[in-house]
Image (cartoon, rainbow, N blue to C red):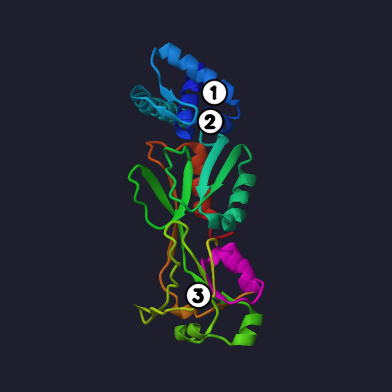
Amino acid sequence: MDKLGTLGIFIQVAEAGSFVAAGHRLGISGSAVGKAIARLEEDLGVRLFNRSTRSMALTEDGSFFLDTCRRIQTEFEEAQARLSRSQAVPRGQLRVSLPLAGMLLMPTISAFMRAYPEINVDLDFTDRLVDVIEEGFDAVIRTGDVKDTRLMSRKLGTFRHVIVASPAYLAEHGYPVVPEDLLQHRCMHHRFANSGKLEPWPLVREGREIRLDLPVTTVTSTLEPLVYLAERAFGITCLPPFAAVQEVAEGKLVSLLDKYIAGTGTFRALWPTSRYLSPKVRHFVDYMAAHLFKS
């Protein structure tokens, strides 16, 4: 078991790129990590990393050994999972990557944390395309299609965007009745962090897409500011429904042009391909699929 633990330290160093960063993940000091790697290299009789004052990179032997260690770790985790009884309490650290808008999913995630207190959740919020395997994530939640063949996925649910504004804004500027009316309004947009492009508003009429050169009054790279500004009568915005469900229910925002909004977005959970899903990941994915759009 001690040797297996050392292999786990080696994997973390390879993924994190430094002793200190690996130590932060593992909850031990960087010097302890460095000593463990030095002992491992001595036992194997090879150098696993090329080190300099500024960087650390795997040697050819290190790359080969990393692939082997990942297989060993995966097989060990699969064996553990298979030996676990279905009623066993899932536990351990669960590292999850979410989009920046994932803050709006926190009611469901916090409910999961209450339901499974033995699971320690490490949440990373970013809109960049993370490498699930190389960066050591147990699971990732994203919208859109899956293109990485190394990953398994499960659809958590679909959603349709909503166009919203505050009652105060509508009292002053009037209600848009058809999509073309938006051309006379203060439109606030979300910009994708990866591409820098504005997220399109999915407008249709009788099944056909409506393309409008909407005014661009305000642009933000995350959704929360759009909700805040819309509540305070700064303009009209288009959001995924979970971003504004509470505000609409409380009457702080009004849903507009519902019959002209088409298509659905999809939330998916992704995790590294494995023949057997670990209990902590399985329970997380199952819980999110069951509760994400019901919370």
**What's the CA distance linking mark 2 and mark 3?**
44 Å
Residue assigned mark 3: 216
Q: Is residue 90 visible?
A: no
Residue 249 is covered by the magenta coloring:
yes
Residue at position x 60%, y 38% in the image: 120
Q: Position of residue 94 (x, y in %)?
A: 54, 39
Q: Which circle's residue, 1 or 2, is located before the other in the chain?
A: 2
Crowd rating for badge 2 (residues with CA inside 10 Å; few <14, some 14–19, many 20+): many
Element under label 3? loop
Say whether residue 48 is left or right of residue 6. left
Residue assigned mark 2: 22
Work out whether 186 lies above or below 26. below
What range of the chain is rendered magenta? Answer: 223-252
Work out whether 96 lies above or below 222. above
Residue 191: give its label: none
Residue at position x 59%, y 55% in the image: 103
Residue at position x 40%, y 18% in the image: 47
Quarter containing the C terminus: bottom right
Query: Which three-letter amino acid code belongs to the residue tagged 3?
Result: Val
Residue assigned mark 1: 33
Query: Which three-letter amino acid code belongs to the residue tagged 2?
Result: Ala
Q: Position of residue 93 (x, y in %)?
A: 56, 36
Q: Which circle's residue, 2 or 3, is located before the other in the chain?
A: 2
- The answer to which of 7 and 186 lies nearer the viewer is 186
Cβ–Cβ under 8 Å for marks 1 and 2: yes
**What's the CA distance linking mark 1 and mark 3?**
51 Å
Query: Which three-letter amino acid code belongs to the residue tagged 1?
Result: Val
Q: Position of residue 119 (x, y in %)?
A: 59, 38
Residue at position x 38%, y 78% in the image: 211
Work out whether 267 lies above or below 52. below
Cβ–Cβ under 8 Å for marks 1 and 3: no
